[in-house]
Amino acid sequence: MTRCYGGIDLGGSYIKAGLLSENGEIIEKTVVPAEVDRGTSSLIKNLRSIGKILSESAASNACELRAIGVGSPGTIKFPEGIVTGATPNIPNWVGINISEIFTDFPFPVLADNDANCMGLAEAMFGAGRGTANGFYLTVGTGIGGALIIDGHVHRGASFCAGEFGHMVFVYNGVKCKTGRLGCLEHYVNAAGLIRSARKYARKYSGSVLRGHKLDVVEIFDAFNKGDSAAAAAVGENAEMLGTAIGSVVNLLNPEVVVVGGGMSQGGAGYIDLIRSSVLKYAFESTTLNLKIEAAKFGNDAGWIGAACLNIG
């Protein structure tokens, strides 16, 4: 019987899940509402339900479900699966032992930080496949990061490594939602891009972005069609993001940088701008063999990486 592995990606709005073969092939996937507003008990019930769905799915696909992995926001003590750090989009989640939610299931369950899972998916089967040292980031509503060093997820002394979005980017800058000043996330996340687009739309009178509510999809669509305001906003965003990535490249000298999350959907032009900025700000010696790529798996990366926690 074919072996398969389950992955669950817990988000503030949805739980994404699926089955993965040991060769990284998607067997089946599903999405259900997380319903975090209904409280911790309801969320735990939903996670158990999705675990049962994966078990049933494995049986219907004639594969042996060997284990399940769970990716969750927050700092996760690994391999125990205990949430030890703040999760602002999931109230009262700190202190929960995610693995223990599934103690009566007939296979092991591992849990890790969701950004680590994204990085693991891309490192094992995606844009970073074949490399041992990589920096993986998600850019969207927030900014997360994962470090793969010598083929292993680097979690840090207290499981907090990779908090790329909360590097201080501007000394004494704007207050972040964490309460700290000048965090990168404030400047280059989706909301930052929208603020920038509004600014440039006022400057360029012929822009299609002028005079109405904006979202990231609309901005990138205008950018890819050559709109001047969108080009200025996206260029500024990519320059700032590339500057910060350049610092990471100088520090870690990775083989690959992979950009995922909602903002990576900006397309090849956006990635090219980020790449140009990194090459400008990182040492030439650290970028000699550096690849900078868009993530392969998109919104599936979280659950795929969670499944990968049990592969290999």
Image: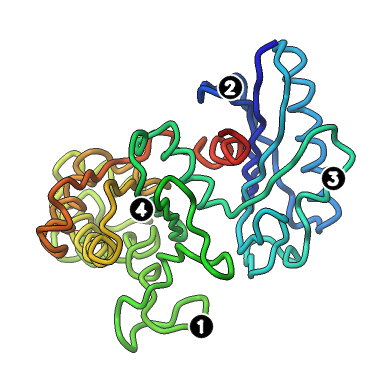
Q: CA distance from mark 3 to mark 4?
A: 34 Å
Circle nearer the viewer, 1 or 4:
4
Of labels 3 and 1, earlier in sequence is 3
The amino acid beneath tag 2 is Ser
Rendered location of residue 110, percent (x, y):
69, 45
Q: Which element carries disc 1, helix, strand or loop? A: loop
Rendered location of residue 134, percent (x, y):
35, 49
Q: Which element carries disc 2, helix, strand or loop? A: strand
Residue 93 is left or right of residue 286, and the answer is: right
Rendered location of residue 49, percent (x, y):
81, 36
Circle nearer the viewer, 3 or 2:
2
The disc label shown at residue 282, or none: none
The disc label shown at residue 45, or none: 3
Q: CA distance from mark 3 to mark 1?
A: 33 Å
Q: CA distance from mark 2 to mark 1?
A: 42 Å
Residue placed under numbered mark 1 in the picture: 179
Quarter placement of the C terminus: top right
- Quadrant of the rendered structure where residue 277 is? bottom left
Of labels 4 and 2, earlier in sequence is 2
Q: Which element carries disc 3, helix, strand or loop? A: helix
Please give the name of the residue rendered at 65% of the width and 56% of the height, measured from the top-left corner.
78
Residue 90 is left or right of residue 201, and the answer is: right
The amino acid beneath tag 3 is Lys
Check the image and name the residue furthest to the front: 150
The amino acid beneath tag 4 is Phe
Please give the name of the residue rendered at 27% of the width and 65% of the height, measured from the top-left corner.
196
Q: Which element carries disc 4, helix, strand or loop? A: strand
Residue placed under numbered mark 2 in the picture: 21
Residue placed under numbered mark 4 in the picture: 135
